[in-house]
Amino acid sequence: MNKIQPAKAIQKKVWHTFFYSSAWRWFQKAIVLMILFLVLNHLTKRESFPDGESYRFPIEGFLSSIALSILIGIIAHLNLKFYKKKYFSKKVEIVTITWYMASTLGYITIMYFPVNIIFNIVAGGQTEFYYLLIGLLITLLLSFILIGLWYAQDIYNLYKLSIKDAEITIESGAKIIKLRYENIACFYSENKIVYTLQSDGTKINTDFTLNELEEKINDQLFFRANRQIIIHKDAVDQIEKIENGKLRIRLKVSTVNDTIAEIMISRYKRKAFIDWFQ
């Protein structure tokens, strides 16, 4: 007869599976990088060509490439952790990804010259500034490509998490309630109290202000329509153009509340709303 495994045993098994699968992925990536470094360093100098009569294995370039890649990997990893905590936990969009890549390449640039000067001193050589500059441009190009490929899956998983699986903790008096984004139709203010309206019509009062909620939620899914309401993209049922360049929004959820029944978007917010909704 099969026995039910204790929860700790299952958790330990899952952790080991995750650890070994993660370690295997890192090992595969390391092998790919080693092959890439071997190829690139064999192409940099004539004496490094395998078919040359004076062939010499480019040990210095190979080791410096490994050391440089380790430093670049550390920079990219630490910067990703920072962005994951400060930005990606709330939203993942082109702007934040661009800033992550730009800041990472900026740190690599700052690190590049001191590291190469140290390598030259240790090796007893001297590299002209022109070649250092060319090397920096090549390093930045390769770093951009490799970091993009290396962390593409991680960033995509963060994007899916921020869109589909995210939730918000609502404080309602003495209660603390967790709500999935997909189950929220809107947040609205009435008589100085902010309510959460769920997709099924259930209303929950909160201890937040709309400004506080606006800072917490994912603005790829939610939009501050006006001073009284924040709406969820999937809750929008109808958009109607009205006078003076305004928009009238109707939600899918049925309610008799005037604040929710007809939501007005001013002409000043019209373009921002359309860009967000599309």
Image (cartoon, rainbow, N blue to C red):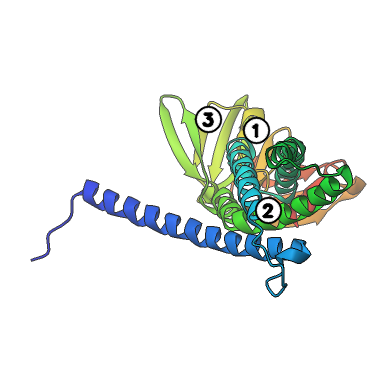
Q: Which mark is residue 276?
A: none
Q: Quadrant of residue 214?
A: top right
Q: Quadrant of residue 118?
A: top right
Q: Could you say whether the residue bearing mark 2 is in a helix, strand or loop?
A: helix
Mark in the foreground, 2 or 3: 2
Instruction: Measure the C-alpha gap from mark 2 to mark 1.
Output: 48 Å
Instruction: Measure the C-alpha gap from mark 1 to mark 3.
Output: 15 Å
* Closer to us: 124 or 43: 124
Mark 2 lies on residue: 61
Instruction: Please tell me how crowded label 1 is: few (under 14), some (14-19), or many (20+) other residues with Cα within 10 Å.
Output: few
Residue type, mark 3 in image = Thr
Name the residue rendered at 52%, 49% in the picture. 183
* Residue 253 appears in the figure: no
Of mark 2 and mark 3, the one earlier in the sequence is 2
Mark in the foreground, 1 or 3: 1
- Decide if residue 256 is on the left or right side of residue 51: left
Mark 1 lies on residue: 215
Q: Which mark is residue 206?
A: 3
Q: Could you say whether the residue bearing mark 3 is in a helix, strand or loop?
A: strand
Instruction: Please tell me how crowded label 2 is: few (under 14), some (14-19), or many (20+) other residues with Cα within 10 Å.
Output: some
Q: Residue 63's spot in the image, x, y percent? A: 61, 51
* Closer to us: 122 or 134: 122
Vertical arrangement, residue 106 with respect to residue 138, above or below: above
Name the residue rendered at 52%, 32% in the picture. 205
Q: Residue 65's spot in the image, x, y percent? A: 65, 51
Of mark 1 and mark 3, the one earlier in the sequence is 3
Quadrant (top left, top right, bottom left, bottom right) of the C terminus: bottom right
Q: Residue 4's spot in the image, x, y percent? A: 15, 57
